[in-house]
Amino acid sequence: MNEPKRLRILTWQVHGNYLYYLSQAPHDFWLVTRPGHPPGYAGRTASFPWGPNVHEVAPPQVRAMDFDVVLYQSRVHWDEDRHQLLSPAQRQLPCIYLEHEPPQQRPVDQRHWAEDASLLVHVTSFNALMWDSGSARVRVIEHGVMVPEQARYEGELPCGLVVVNHLRRRGRPLGYDIFETLRHSVPLTLVGMEADHTPGGHGEIPNMELPAFMARYRFCFSPIRWTSLSLALIEAMTVGLPIVGLATTELGTVISNGHNGWLETDPQQLLPVMRRLLDDRALAQRWGEAARSTALARFGMPRFLRDWNDALSGVCAARETPDTTPLGPNRPAQLASAAA
């Protein structure tokens, strides 16, 4: 198989972990970076061991540079930066909009704003199902994660771990009320941004240290009602933690009760499962081994990078040889390519 053409990709740092995993692809990434590294313009932060293929570019320099693809990841970059920072020629380049979340305003009937992108990528099939993507060309590329080889399940702490940033501030969608209720019945530790300001919170753990930190806990708990499939949960599975959580969004397709974890829509029904795992470390380890197998098979980096190389090369090839086959509203782009 031929190696993919090395591309020059302009993007922004919106989700640090995701971008770090994506930067393992054999391309050059240029991150729009502002002084002080504010959200959305953070560049090569010290949180990750970025490779030499990841570069920073100041906003005034963007117009003078040559790129092959523009990868948008937030609405402000699509609505504002696209017009303020890019030249007319750059705005005509192949572009992908990477949507990290399900619709936040109106589940089911919220129309996505990036209909005229070359490709709209959703990170889960649930998200793609919930968004009204209009006439956009759509593809689902599921997450890919990697954790250090030495980060493997130990489970010596009889306690559940919750990994959510800004949980108290983000409230009900992320399940702050559920965490607050259940932590009085079973031992649960919260880590993430602002966790030290939340009862039951430990604080923030550096990104590259988190897998080894996770490994000491008995299970990982997700109180989330409505957001995308958490990268932290997949990382926990890859380490070897069983998952306990709500049977909502894409998680319901990942966890099988009694195999690699347990899901319910009634949080109170999770308490006996949590107590069982706290009392039976061997059971937790068996479920955790199954969770790791699930994560490696479904969210391994080789598949993730293949999917992204295919998507990137596809939008570039489409620019050189326009596809005149009508897709129709919401027809997934991968179905058209599979039929070729």
Image (cartoon, grey):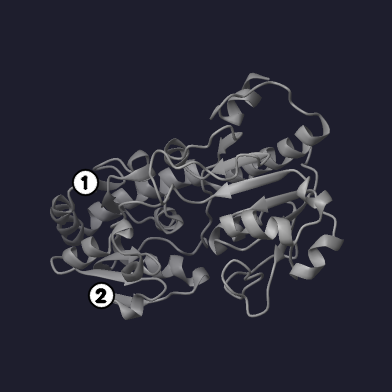
Instruction: Rate crowding at label 1 as few (under 14), some (14 to 19) or many (20 or more) other CA atoms within 10 Å.
Output: few
Residue toward you, 166 or 192:
166
Residue occupied by mark 1: 265
Left or right: 63 in relation to 99? right
Q: Say which mark, if any, is on residue 202.
A: none
Amino acid type indicated by mark 2: Gly
- Does any portion of residue 75 appear in the rendered image? yes
Residue at 27% across / 53% down in the picture? Answer: 244
Q: What element does badge 1 sit on?
A: loop
Image quadrant of residue 191?
bottom left
Residue occupied by mark 2: 200
- Marks 2 and 1 sit apart, C-alpha to C-alpha, by 23 Å
Whole-percent x and y of residue 299? Answer: 50, 46
Q: Quadrant of the C terminus?
A: top right
Amino acid type indicated by mark 1: Thr
Residue toward you, 105 or 38:
105
- Does any portion of residue 11 appear in the rendered image? no
Image quadrant of residue 323?
top right
Whether 255 is drawn above or below 271: the answer is: above
Residue toward you, 290 or 330:
330
